[in-house]
Image (tube, rainbow, N blue to C red):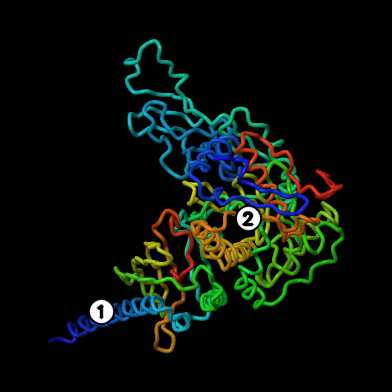
Amino acid sequence: MNLNKLIEEDRLGGVFRVHRAAFTSAEIAALEQANIFQRCWLYLGHDSELPNAGDFRRRTVAGQPLFWVRGSDGRARVFYNSCTHWGANVCRLDEGNAELFQCFYHAWTFNNQGDLVSVPDEAAYGEGFHKEAMGLAAPPRVDNYRGLYFVSFDRDVEDLISYLGDAKEYIDLILDQAEEGWRVIPGTQKYSVRANWKMFSLNSLDSYHVRPLHSTFFKYTESLGSGDPPPLPPTEFPGPQGRSLSLRNGHGVDIFPSLSRARPIAHWHPILGEESKEEIRKRRARLVERFGEQRAYLMCNTNRLMLIYPNFALHDIAGVSLRYFEPVGQEYMEVTVQTLAPRGESPGLLNRRLENFLSFLGPGGFAHPDDIEAMESAQLGFRAGGPEWIDASRGMHREATALDELHVRAFWRQWHANLSGDAKAQRHHDSLSGRESSEDFEK
Amino acid sequence: MTSGRDDSLNEKLAALLLEREVEKFIVEEAVMLDEWRLDDWLALFTEDARYMVPATDMPTADPKETLALINDDVARLRGRVERLKSRHAHREFPWSRTRRFITNVRIKEIIGEEILANASFLVYRIRSGQVDPLIGSYGYTLRRVDGALKIATRRAVLDLEALRPHGTLSIIL
């Protein structure tokens, strides 16, 4: 496969297209496993999922069974879920609390810090057997940014904070919204899509599809009446058309005014209930007090669709959702969705937050099933033969609005760099004359 | 025959008739859904009704405080039906074929005017070359309104560990 023929870019003419083999080739899928999923930082979970010593969660990351456990010493660690003896899973529940993990096969026993503490009939082993070296194995790199844990299978991967690039600022813009901190709400939406995993990355950034694809959702929310009128924007950014931005390293965000739509933090709409008005207005006033009008406006009156490259979508729209997805072959993926809520939120507003989330999002919502249909339909369309490319040129000749595809192109450039063996794409922005790689252009 | 034995027989007959009525109600409901008679189906609900599908990892949880798959009040249920009928619910246009097998219908408890009943389901969704089985149980709260049974709560609990490979719950489960 000639990797140089996968992307065609004509900067002057404003054309950017990607060969459909990117979605259908088993060879490319294998290269992605090696060069992306074994090299990048991949989302693992949120700190609040392991509140107490001994709490554990099973996770599959890049197809590899892991478990994540807070040791009796208070530290969260990640282990390969495989006994160092004959390989069976030592953690056999999705979640729970344990001091010890005893393998059910031969009863080798590990503590919640990964040490091998007991081997039946230990005297049967000779001098060369070192119990202390037979503890559970751990992926080489685990780190967290503000409670969001990531894992990497590459010992030499750059530090998480540098990997996150400018996405860090947008994570802050979301996490700063809850003064008392966030918690993952119990309940996980686990589903799949019969499409290449990159479809989900692209769909997670894209606003261009929202009006045409999700008309039934808008019809429903508009039938409920209108929310509070939005305030006059105290800042020119992101502007009435919103912006699509590259955040370096393949990460991107779509940011746009939420107008009179519901934002549990902190913009009232009838879907959030009369009884929540006061709590929401107080919350907004507090955010203005803490962060000033401009930043509070961005928090309360704009939505964000953010992709942390390659496979973690952190969405701040209709609530905050954590969506991560994994390829299983080139035409199928497994998706996991969780949601965050502020720790101190009243039961009434939490209920409304969740209802608002479900009305749009998730496999039973009024919008997301149609995203899945569109991804699967495109995957089927690729079997047609005929057209060789998908087009991602939108807005290449102008300052990109939220409906443009600048972040999509940044994703593809990073993807292509990884496939070619580079850690970073050289250009993460569109390059227009006089605006080459200018940071100001993006902000 | 003593009157005591009559009473006992009458009680048994009444219980049997109620069981039959509940079973018939639930089966008729399933047929309505298979035939996509969604307006008829909507008319089965009380004004304060809920239709819920909990997340597959929290089958017993309350959707007020946990992330579920579906938690509809009547307004959202109407919206859902309107959406499915609109031709713009792309996951269900054209509509999928479904076939529902309802069994093990049991009355769990009767509290005043309300009947708590359970049933097992196997619902096949067939579309675009895929056959996806949905397996689980229903928990109903049925209420008698003007002599007829109505649905006050309809909780569909999936036994599946995940919606894989189904992807969505775009039909009414």
Mark 2 falls on what kind of element? Answer: helix
Residue A345 figure quarter: bottom right
Q: Please state which of the two labelled residues, at mark 2 or mark 1, is closer to the viewer.
A: 2
Residue A93: horizontal and vertical position, in percent?
Answer: 43, 43
Q: Is residue A356 left or right of residue B63?
A: right
The reply to whether dot 2 and dot 1 touch (C-beta < 8 Å) is: no
**Looking at this view, is B135 or B22 the one in front?**
B135
* Residue at numbered disc 2: A204
Farthest-out residue, top: A127
Tell me the kind of residue under disc 2.
Answer: Ser
Question: What is the chain identity of the residue bearing mark 2?
Answer: A
Tell me the CA gap for discs 2 and 1: 54 Å
Residue B64: horizontal and vertical position, in percent?
Answer: 55, 63
* Residue at numbered disc 1: B16
Q: Is residue B119 above or below residue A24?
A: below
**Looking at this view, is B102 or B38 the one in front?**
B38
Classify mark 2: residues with Cα within 10 Å, few (<14), some (14-19) or many (20+).
Answer: many
Q: Residue at x 82, y 61 (%)?
A: A239
Mark 1 falls on what kind of element? Answer: helix
Tell me the kind of residue under disc 1.
Answer: Leu
Q: Residue at x 48, y 25 (%)?
A: A115
Q: Is residue A236 above or below residue A418?
A: below
Question: What is the chain identity of the residue bearing mark 1?
Answer: B
